[in-house]
Image: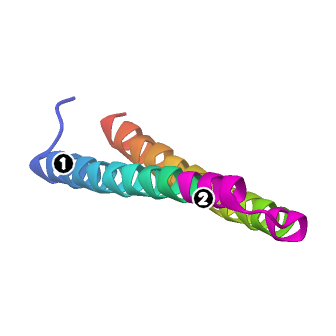
Amino acid sequence: MPLSESQRNQIANYKIQIESVRKALNTIKENKKQKSEYYANAIKSSKDANYKRTLRQRKIYEMNGYVSQIESKKKDIERLKGYIQSIKR
């Protein structure tokens, strides 16, 4: 059975949302990369062992935060794709 106009509009809206989430995902990945480079340089340039340890711990903490955000955005994309599939059925 062909899709109705309403269903086509819903699919188009979901595709727009997916594109928006993908852009947000790319921004998060870029921020993660920049922050990782920042911490790598800070760790290399530091002379104090305690400060290096603190920087490493902060880096791990922040990278885990970025990983959580990335996983959340990936789940959002899969959820939206599922909505599209359910409309097409």
Q: Position of residue 60 (x, y in %)?
A: 76, 58
Task: Give the residue displayed 67% in from the left and 64% down from the top.
Answer: 62
- Residue marked by disc 1: 12
- Image check: 16 left or right of 64? left
Q: From this viewpoint, which residue is outermost toward the front?
A: 47
- Tell me the quarter of the image containing the N terminus: top left
Depth-wise, is mark 2 or mark 1 nearer the camera? 2
Q: Is residue 65 magenta?
A: no
- Which of the 4 quarters of the picture holds residue 68? bottom right
Q: Is residue 78 above or below residue 68?
A: above
The residue singled out by tag 2 in the image is: 66
SS class, disc 1: helix
Asked if residue 37 shows in the view, the reply is: yes
Mark 1: amino acid: Ala
Residue beneath the point at 14% across and 44% down: 4
Q: Is residue 2 left or right of residue 43?
A: left
Majority secondary structure in the magenta region: helix
Magenta-highlighted residues: 37-52
Quarter the C terminus occupies = top left
Residue 70 is situated, as x and y percent measured from the top left of the image, at 55, 52
Q: SS at mark 2?
A: helix
| CA gap, disc 2 and disc 1 | 29 Å
Q: How is the image coloured?
A: rainbow
Task: Depth check: give the residue in front, 43 or 28.
Answer: 43
